[in-house]
Image (tube, helix red, strand yellow):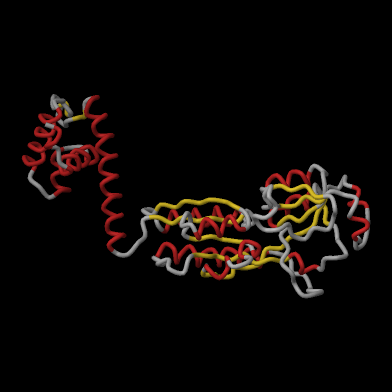
Amino acid sequence: MLDALTLDQLRVLISVADEGSFSAAARKLRRVQSAVSQTMRNLEDQLGLVLWDRSTKLPTLTEQGRVILSAARRVSAEVEGLRKLAASLVAGMEPSVSLCLDALFPLPAAIELCREFAQAFPQVELRVDTQTMSAVSGKVLRGEASIGVVSPMGLSGSIGHKLQRRVLAPIRMLPVVSPQHPLAKLRGPLSLEQLDPYVQIVLSERSEEESQGVPDQAVLSSKTWRVSDLHTKHEMLRAGLGFGNLPEHLIGPDLRSKTLVRIHPASWGEDEHKLYLSAIHVPELVLGPAHEWVLQRLAALCQALDKQSPKQSPKQSPKQKHS
């Protein structure tokens, strides 16, 4: 008998519960009261349950009726979601967006993007992944992500020619150490001779074969510790285990609380630590409304972040350094 259940019956049940009586529900649904009453009796017969206690002036839900009402609300919501999804697909809306972000992308901006996306496209599935350097481009080229946000090193070699690219605002990388590190006690520009005795912690893609992945960048010390994620590098620098670059947006609280302090390698100019993240996708990607919205918001969020950053006077031509 359950096969004979209809959405109309469930909607009438919800309406009676919400309006408080059969007559009020009939007025809302623009039906005669007898039709609403008959619909409820048919539903009870099909379920084999008594949903309404009719011994009082106004019918009230039985305990079993309250359970069925809760299930009816869920079914109704799912059907409404299905209806909206079908309508959006007919209108050209994508069913999903998959986004792969470089670990350097500011986390607050990523969270804000997701929050706004959920409000703008409630029927579109969003998948978010975080990788580093060429791993971002690799996922986009393999079709595992429809849009990527990649650092310059992730576009090295022939990779960049295979992807459509939209340049976003720059991210500033700052060389830092723990205040307990010996380099923190040195003033002025630090020469290679002063840096070389100390470990430099490098965000690295190099494999055991040394032939795969992006080469290590901006290495100033013969002693390097390689890590594959930004969080580990951050914590190692905070622990005083070496020196290295980190994005300004990540270490702002550390600089204010002095859990990390800036150093000034003589080999690097102020603008040498500025790199541009880029939004990428394969040229054949059809940009529906959701994908186009993501690309536009990525640019806007990065530009807003850039405006909040203190400006530095350029001292030499910028080079893009990652480590």
Percent x, y of residue 276: 65, 67
**Identity of the residue drawn at 82% across and 74% down:** 315
Percent x, y of residue 260: 80, 50
Q: Considering only vertical position in the picture, is 80 above or below 146?
A: above
Q: Considering only vertical position in the picture, is 191 above or below 9?
A: below
Number of on-image labels: 0
Tell me, yes or no, if residue 24 can be seen here.
no
Quarter of the picture containing the N terminus is top left
Quarter of the picture containing the C terminus is bottom right
Horizontally, residue 123 falls left or right of residue 322, namely: left
In front of the other: 281 or 17: 281
Percent x, y of residue 14: 22, 40
In front of the other: 135 or 245: 135
Horizontally, residue 63 falls left or right of residue 41, namely: right
Quarter location, residue 317: bottom right
Percent x, y of residue 32: 7, 45
In front of the other: 224 or 165: 224
Horizontally, residue 56 falls left or right of residue 306, namely: left
Tell me, yes or no, if residue 63 can be seen here.
yes
Q: Considering only vertical position in the picture, is 277 above or below 115?
A: below
**Identity of the residue drawn at 63% across and 67% down:** 157
Horizontally, residue 321 falls left or right of residue 49, namely: right
**Identity of the residue drawn at 80% across and 74% down:** 316
Quarter location, residue 220: bottom right
